[in-house]
Image (spheres, helix red, strand yellow):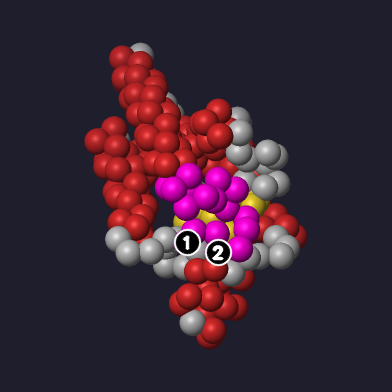
């Protein structure tokens, strides 16, 4: 019972940290977008950053990943629980980032609004709904890994299911960066300013189903 209580406490602390981090992230993005007059990023030259702004923003994004990995490493006691807590932190942070942007500047207007999700190594574009779905999946998976006896079910996932998961991740990354990848031959400047015209929902749904395979397996095993 004490171990379960400690795991729940760590879960709660990770969630609280991620929510606080989400406010900091939303505020920083709001400041940046207000500076360049791009509160809605889906417009020509979505992030017109010049001088020191661009490298600072790229390093800030990398630092965000370092922070998420660090909180997971501190909360977990084994490699899989560390990954689990990192997934929880990432998912909660991502969802509340959009919640707080909505409170700060009334954006996004809907879950289908386009957003620049990430800038490394190329701009990722997608409707807000897409990363939120992945964030929810990460929270579920992280909770299964980090809490109680279900961690045994998660570590029992077959190599085939993990290969399907990695295939799903690769497909999702392709969908997010498809427009940027097509613009690469035209140069970095065009790649940074390209606006996507349509999101490939069918391929994303396949990618999401593949990513969800280990989670579905763990839930099914734990329910027996």
Residue 116's mark? none
Q: Which residue is drawn at 29% across and 33% down?
A: 75
Query: Badges 2 and 1: C-beta atoms under 8 Å apart?
Result: yes
Placement of 206 over or under 112, stated as above or below: below
For the C terminus, the image quarter is top right
Depicted 156 relative to depicted 96: above or below:
below
Label 2 neighbour load within 10 Å: few <14, some 14-19, many 20+? some
Q: Where, by quadrant of the figure, is residue 51 drawn?
A: bottom left
Residue 53 seen from this side: yes
**Relative image position of residue 9 (x, y in whole percent):** 35, 19
Residue 62 located within the stretch drawn in magenta: no
Our reading of the magenta stretch's main secondary structure is loop
88 lies above or below 204: above
With respect to residue 123, does 183 lie above or below?
below
Is residue 126 toward the left or the right of residue 201 in the image? left
Q: What stretch is highlighted in magenta?
A: 32-48
Looking at the figure, which quarter contains the N terminus?
A: top left
Q: How far apart are marks 2 and 1 (CA)?
A: 6 Å
Identify the mark at residue 45; answer none if there is no mark.
2
Of 119 and 133, which appears nearest the observer? Answer: 119
- The residue nearer to you, when weighing 125 against 52, is 52
Identity of the residue drawn at 31% across and 14% down: 2
Q: What element carries label 2?
A: loop
Residue located 52% across and 80% down the image:
184
Residue 57 horizontal/vertical position (percent): 36, 55
Decide which of 42, 68 is in the foreground and name it: 42
Residue 189 placement (x, y as % from top left): 48, 75
- The answer to if 35 sits in the magenta stretch is yes
Q: Mark 1 points at which residue?
A: 48
The image shows residue 173 at horizontal and vertical percentages of 54, 63
């Amino acid at each position: 019972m004490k171990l379960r209580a400690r795991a729940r406490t760590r879960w709660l602390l990770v969630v609280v940290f991620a929510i606080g981090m989400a406010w900091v992230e939303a505020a920083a993005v709001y400041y940046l977008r207000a500076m360049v007059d791009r509160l809605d990023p889906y417009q020509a030259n979505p992030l017109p950053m010049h001088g020191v702004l661009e490298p600072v923003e790229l390093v800030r994004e990398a630092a965000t990943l370092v922070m998420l990995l660090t909180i997971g490493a501190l909360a977990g006691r084994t490699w899989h629980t560390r990954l689990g807590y990192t997934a929880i932190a990432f998912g909660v942070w991502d969802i509340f980032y959009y919640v707080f942007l909505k409170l700060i500047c009334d954006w996004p207007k809907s879950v289908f609004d386009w957003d620049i999700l990430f800038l490394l190594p190329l701009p990722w574009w997608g409707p807000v709904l897409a990363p939120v779905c992945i964030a929810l999946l990460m929270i579920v998976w992280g909770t299964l890994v980090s809490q109680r006896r279900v961690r045994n079910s998660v570590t029992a996932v077959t190599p085939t299911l993990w290969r399907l998961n990695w295939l799903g991740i690769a497909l999702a990354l392709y969908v997010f960066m498809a427009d940027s990848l097509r613009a690469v031959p035209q140069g970095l400047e065009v790649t940074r300013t390209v606006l996507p015209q349509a999101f490939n929902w069918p391929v994303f749904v396949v990618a999401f189903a593949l990513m969800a395979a280990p989670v579905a397996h763990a839930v099914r095993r734990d329910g027996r």
